[in-house]
Image: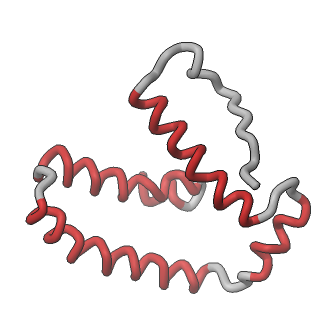
Amino acid sequence: MGFLSIGTKENAAMLPVSVFLFDLILIQGFTIHNIKKNMMIAVPVFLAAVLTSFLFFKDFNSIIGDYSIRPFTVWERLITEPRVILFYISLLLYPITSRLTLIHDFDISK
């Protein structure tokens, strides 16, 4: 079901990454030896996934063209995204009710 969900929602593509990290941290233990051993497997799999994605997405110029209708550029999105991710991680670590809303309005980084 996880494999099928990747075709419907982009966030589901993080499922294998999450399972890999949970296994590395919680089951195997977070040691230098385990990290090196797992990177020998994870790096080729990641590179194969990136190369495979090039087969499915051929028109790279459409990425830039899609941002012509948005109020921000590709660069502004790339520099805003780390703030958004850190905010959501902080919600996991410090979940007070005043921060747990469904609507978050992040300012666009310039």
Task: Give the percent coordinates (x, y) of residue 92.
Answer: 42, 31
Residue at the outermost right position = 69
Task: Give the percent coordinates (x, y) of residue 91.
Answer: 48, 29
Q: How is the image coloured?
A: secondary structure
Camera-nearest residue between 20 and 88 = 88
Residue 68: quadrant of the picture: bottom right
Query: Residue at coordinates 12% horizontally, 62% vertically from top-left?
Result: 32
Camera-nearest residue between 41 and 75 = 75
Above or below — where is 104 with respect to 80? above
Above or below — where is 73 with respect to 82? below
Residue at the outermost front position = 110
Residue 47: quadrant of the picture: bottom left
Task: Give the percent coordinates (x, y) of residue 41.
Answer: 23, 74
Query: Residue at coordinates 45% horizontally, 38% vertically from top-left?
Result: 89
Query: Residue at coordinates 48% horizontally, 58% vertically from top-left?
Result: 13
Quarter of the picture holding the C terminus: bottom right
Task: Give the percent coordinates (x, y) of residue 106.
Answer: 71, 39
